[in-house]
Amino acid sequence: MADSNTADNSLEASGILVDEAQTGAVGSSSGSDAGTDGSAEAVQQRDVASSPSLPAASVKSLPTGSARRLRNSHVVALALKRMLKGPAPTLDHIIRFLSSGSGHDKFWMLTQYFTKVVVWLFAKRGQKSASERVRTLSNLVADYRIMIRLTGLVPMAQYVRYAEQFPAKTRLLQWLDRIMNLTLVCYYPLEHIYWLGAHQILPFSENLIDIAGYWSCRFWAVWVAMQFVRLGEEYRLIQGKRREIYTRDKIDAAQMQVELDAVSAETKSWKTQLLINACYFPLTLHWSIRGSTFPDVAVGVCGTVAAVAQACNVWKATA
């Protein structure tokens, strides 16, 4: 069952995270220098002439073309020195993103699904060789993502304990959490059986491997369906908060605005989760049904949108 290789990390989809103060230094410094001397040529002459290893008299004695090339190379070296010397907040942010378990997975998830779209584009243009190469990359990434989920039951066990120690806001949400957690507890072992058997690491029969692959996706499909119910209950609670703020008898205008902003942030997060779940739903149905005709490029589009939305959430969380 090749398509089940692309089953996504549903625990991450449930919202659990496993885990520019100074920018444009070169541009601002260069602009300051140009403003002082009046032109870029003046900056070049000043920087070269002020170099202790290159006296101004030596530059004047060089042919015009050689002097210009020497000055340009010196300016480039100076710009690189200034750029590398200053802080790099964006680079630091990227490292934090990729170092987190969720960020690492979302990077590869985006790669896995977007390459399916690239495969379709190459195939449509008749570039069969390029299409097959990219398809190989996509399958390898999907296989890698399943492999790193072999430890998925460990954080799942931790979350089950957390959900019982800190109950949800309503009784319905609490029971939804329990049912959804149960589906994941079933999902992970079945996916592990599929992957270990498909790679002949454990001597499972072909029939068991096939059944485990399909049923792991079916349990994931149940999780996604229950997530729609959960999102509906969360939306009801958000709307209740908004009504309570507007109907409160005595409230300061500034305090009201703060609370409304918080509700707006919750609503925005809710919409993102709804988008992610809506993208997952057709994928789970596709992998749960034998002989599904859902096109692979549609799998790529849905997965890419879900990956981008989740990656944005992790990017904000690692700011």
Image (cartoon, rainbow, N blue to C red):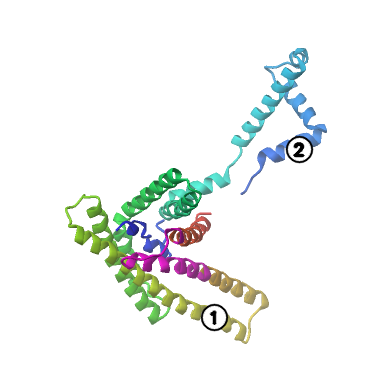
Residue 302's place in the image compared with 86, above or below, is: below
Q: Nearer the viewer, residue 304 or 291?
A: 291
> Where is residue 129, by image quadrant?
top left
Q: Nearer the viewer, residue 227 or 286?
A: 286
Q: Position of residue 185 (x, y in %)?
A: 28, 66
* Residue at numbered disc 1: 239
Q: Which amino acid, mark 1?
A: Gln
* SS under mark 1: helix
Span colored in magenta: 270-298
Judge whether residue 44 is colored magenta.
Answer: no
Q: Answer yes or no: is residue 67 visible.
A: yes
> Where is residue 210, by image quadrant?
bottom left
* Residue at numbered disc 2: 32
Question: What is the quadrant of the N terminus in the image?
Answer: bottom left
Residue occupying image coordinates x 67% and y 25%: 73
Front label number (1 vs 2): 1
Label 1: few (<14), some or many (≥20) within 10 Å? few
Label 2: few (<14), some or many (≥20) within 10 Å? few
Q: Which amino acid, mark 2?
A: Ser
From the image, give the main secondary structure of the stretch colored magenta. helix
Q: Answer yes or no: is residue 50 visible.
A: no
The label on residue 57 is none
Q: Position of residue 153 (x, y in %)?
A: 29, 60
